[in-house]
Amino acid sequence: MNMSSTDCIFCKVANKELQTKIIFENEDFLAFNDIKPVSPTHLLVIPKKHYKNLWEVEDKELLGKLLHTAKEVAKQEGLKDGFRTVINTGDNGGQTVYHLHVHVLGGRFHKWPPG
Ligand code: 5GP
Ligand code: ZN
């Protein structure tokens, strides 16, 4: 659980150590396609800096920018009919990759509540 940034798959994406197509990039964040998409559009927005998850972030400006970036990504991808943003935190939240990320899901209707 206490994964250091050197073994973190999303840090490798952020450091361009993996061949991952970058869909969106700004100063602090990157967005790329989820490897196992559950919607026609399924992007992950990550801070370039490693944070395990929401528990670890106290930087309110960064959190605000993260959500704003998710919206910019949705806009760029043409999700004008709406989209779902998800942040899974910890084991009960269903988090599997311990580098903070926002899922941006679009291109179909997303029912509520989720499973
Ligand atoms: P979580 O369950 O932690 O909220 O979401 C992790 C997401 O990362 C999953 O949707 C999974 O498909 C995706 N994922 C895991 N490994 C990789 C990878 O190496 N590349 C990409 N693009 N996505 C990944
Ligand atoms: Zn990381």
Image: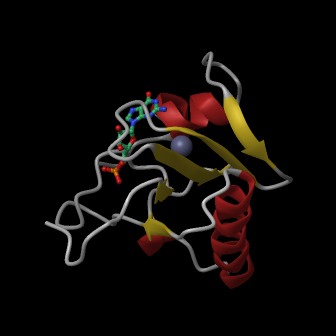
The answer to whether 74 appears left or right of 84 in the picture is right
- 77 sits left or right of 110 in the view: right
Residue drawn 67% across the image and 78% down it: 59
Q: For the image shown, how many numbered marks are present on the structure?
A: 0
Q: Quadrant of residue 16?
A: top right
Left or right of 90: which side holds 79?
right
- Name the one closer to the observer, 80 or 54: 80
Point out residue 41 in the picture as x, y percentages from the top left corner: 49, 46
- Residue displayed at 35% across by 64% down: 109
* Ligand 2 visible in quadrant: top right
Q: Can you say whether 87 is above or below 10 in the image?
A: below
Instruction: Pinpoint residue 58: horizontal percent, then vertical percent.
Output: 59, 80
Given the current orientation, which residue lies at the most extreme right position? 27
**Relative to 12, residue 43 above or below:** below
Looking at the picture, how far across and down is residue 82, in whole percent? 53, 70
- Quadrant holding the C terminus: bottom left
Q: Which residue is found at the position 60% from the left and 60% from the top?
A: 79
Image quadrant where residue 36 sits:
top left
In the picture as drawn, the residue positioned furthest to the bottom comes out as 60
Quarter of the image holding residue 24? Answer: top right
